[in-house]
Image: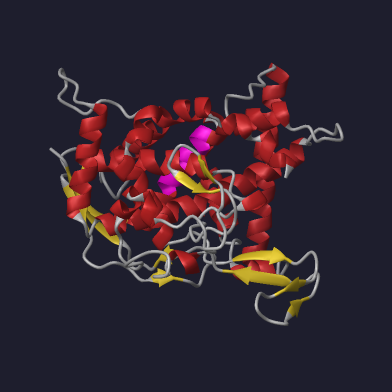
């Protein structure tokens, strides 16, 4: 739990303010170079994109640029990116049940982990040699400056490297999946795409010289209520992790039964169950971001006998405890530390997409429950058209 505090400088409002223009730059550059949107033709006005693949690429580019710095981002255009792909293939349920099978996919995973780890350690050593230890620069700087445990022991470079791998991989799948589902749902709601575009016009304003919408900023992003509600609604319909595991530390009685779960056993919980329940959300299976505009209709607890304190991280009030029916980022001590960053990253990517394109989706893909993440089944395609 102490490690969460080490990363706080890289997840502060001041850091987020610096991240937004970097994310915009990455997204715009991607549209100019990706085969899904460019194909070497400046005058290409429309096309089809494999949304899960394109959003996965955008997610790792933007996360590495902001959280890990320019050194790491520059390496993603080289063979370094293939190491992440090999590591990614070792991130499936069977790897957690059988973590060390003598198979090629495992060997490549372990080799990739070692190469990525060594790269991070080289960057850390280089910064330390130059005296470049700035906690506000990025996550690497934050860990180098702040990573001292309560017992006075400083986090080793190896542990920092391991944590960096875990943070980037942990957020990569979930954010890529969420932005993919958002684009897919919006592709069937042209009214929402237009409303989201007009929201940016109203909040950011139009530059009188260029006749373009003024740049996105962190402050403006927070004012985009419909955009943030779209992210909320996407997370409700598609909880990034369909299951979470917890170890039983003390004998635990199942409520309203005599059954006792012994200490040391594991329980599996689906946080998405209540988010799709008609008991808590009217027309739960329907994608409707505007439902969040009426706070009185959104329950803060799944137990009517309890009143839980809520907290606002800048994107609307959420339950501070674990009894809320809406828990896409978990709750309590284990709540995801990247929640605020996720909204900044997702919001900036989607806002930039909305500025550049309109799009449609012929058929909404089914959900793939075979992986640990609630991915859309392939082919997950959007038909895009450049705005004029």
Q: Position of residue 309 (x, y in %)?
A: 56, 47
Left or right: residue 173 versus residue 321 is: left
Please give the name of the residue rendered at 67% of the width and 66% of the height, measured from the top-left corner. Answer: 96
Q: Quadrant of residue 372?
A: bottom right
**Is residue 70 highlighted in magenta?**
no
Quadrant location, the C terminus: top left
Left or right: residue 89 versus residue 219 is: right
In this rendering, is residue 70 above or below 340?
A: above
In this rendering, is residue 169 above or below 40?
A: below
Q: Quadrant of residue 201?
A: top left
Please give the name of the residue rendered at 29% of the width and 67% of the height, measured from the top-left corner. Answer: 364
Q: What's the magenta bit mostly, secondary-structure-wise?
A: helix
Q: Which stretch is magenta? A: 57-66
Frontmost residue, 340 versus 87 = 340
In this rendering, is residue 155 above or below 321?
A: above
Q: Position of residue 225 (x, y in %)?
A: 32, 41
Frontmost residue, 35 versus 70 = 70
Frontmost residue, 280 versus 331 = 280
Q: How many marks?
A: 0
């Amino acid at each position: 739990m102490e490690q969460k505090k080490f990363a706080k400088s890289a997840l502060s409002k001041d850091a987020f303010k610096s991240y937004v223009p970097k994310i915009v730059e990455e997204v715009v550059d991607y549209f100019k170079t990706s085969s899904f949107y460019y194909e070497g033709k400046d005058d290409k006005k429309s096309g089809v994109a494999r949304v899960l693949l394109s959003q996965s690429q955008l997610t790792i580019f933007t996360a590495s640029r902001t959280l890990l710095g320019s050194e790491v981002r520059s390496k993603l255009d080289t063979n370094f990116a293939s190491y992440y792909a090999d590591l990614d293939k070792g991130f499936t349920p069977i790897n957690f049940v059988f973590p060390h099978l003598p198979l090629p996919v495992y060997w490549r995973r372990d080799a990739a982990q070692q190469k990525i780890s060594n790269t991070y350690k080289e960057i850390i050593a280089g910064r330390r040699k130059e005296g470049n230890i700035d906690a506000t620069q990025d996550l690497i700087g934050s860990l180098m400056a702040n990573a001292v445990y309560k017992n006075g022991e400083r986090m080793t470079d190896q542990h920092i490297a391991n944590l960096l791998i875990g943070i980037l991989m942990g957020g990569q799948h979930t954010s890529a999946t969420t932005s993919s589902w958002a684009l897919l749902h919006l592709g069937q709601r042209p009214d929402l795409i237009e409303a989201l575009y007009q929201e940016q016009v109203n909040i950011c304003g139009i530059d009188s010289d260029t006749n373009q919408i003024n740049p996105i900023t962190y402050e403006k992003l927070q004012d985009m209520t419909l955009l943030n509600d779209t992210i909320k609604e996407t997370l409700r319909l598609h909880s990034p992790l369909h299951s979470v595991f917890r170890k039983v530390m003390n004998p635990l009685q199942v409520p309203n039964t005599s059954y006792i779960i012994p200490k040391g056993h594991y329980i599996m919980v689906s946080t998405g169950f209540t988010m799709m329940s008609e008991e808590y959300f009217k027309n739960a299976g329907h994608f409707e971001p505007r439902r969040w505009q009426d706070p009185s209709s959104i329950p803060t607890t799944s137990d009517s006998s309890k009143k839980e304190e809520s907290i606002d991280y800048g994107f609307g009030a959420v339950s501070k405890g674990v009894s809320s029916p809406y828990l896409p980022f978990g709750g309590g001590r284990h709540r995801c530390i990247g929640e605020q960053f996720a909204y900044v990253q997702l919001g900036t990517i989607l806002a930039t997409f909305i500025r550049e394109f309109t799009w449609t989706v012929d058929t909404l893909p089914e959900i793939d429950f075979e992986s640990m993440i609630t991915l859309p089944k392939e082919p997950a395609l959007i038909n895009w058209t450049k705005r004029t």
